[in-house]
Amino acid sequence: MKLKRPAYTKFICAKCKCHEKIPTDIVLQMDMMDPGDPLYPPMFNCEKCDGLMRPVYFRGYTGIEYTYDGN
């Protein structure tokens, strides 16, 4: 059974708390291409500061669920 995913994944900057929606297809592609530790979620650089954008909620292609509440 294929998992139904939202069209966008909400991200929060760990530094400035800016919110951004990134297409879930892009996030999944980044997650699949990342050879790093699967315990870390896909992250992007914040365009407003030098912080890291983390997903509020994301289920990776491996089934690992990541959550971040901004704290």
Image (cartoon, rainbow, N blue to C red):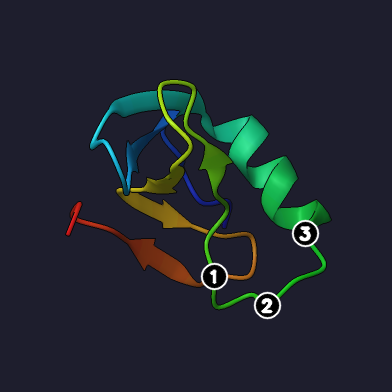
Q: Could you tell me how far apart the alpha carbons at marks 2 and 3 are, in whole angstroms?
A: 8 Å
Q: Is residue 12 left or right of residue 66?
A: left
The amino acid marked with disc number 3 is: Asp
Q: Which residue is denoted by mark 1 in the rendering?
A: 40
Q: Is residue 32 above or below residue 44?
A: below
Q: Residue at x 73, y 42 (%)?
A: 29
The amino acid marked with disc number 1 is: Tyr
Q: Which residue is denoted by mark 3 in the rendering?
A: 34
Residue 53, given in percent of the width and then of the height, sits at 43, 42
Q: Could you tell me how far apart the alpha carbons at marks 1 and 3 are, in whole angstroms?
A: 10 Å
Q: Earlier in the sequence, mark 1 or mark 3?
A: 3
Name the image quarter holding residue 19: top left
Which sits in the foreground, 15 or 26?
A: 15
Which sits in the foreground, 40 or 58?
A: 40
Name the mark on residue 37.
2
| Secondary structure of the residue carrying numbered label 2 | loop
Name the image quarter holding residue 16: top left
Q: Residues within 10 Å of mark 1 (few under 14, many from 20)?
A: few
Residue 48, given in percent of the width and then of the height, sits at 41, 21
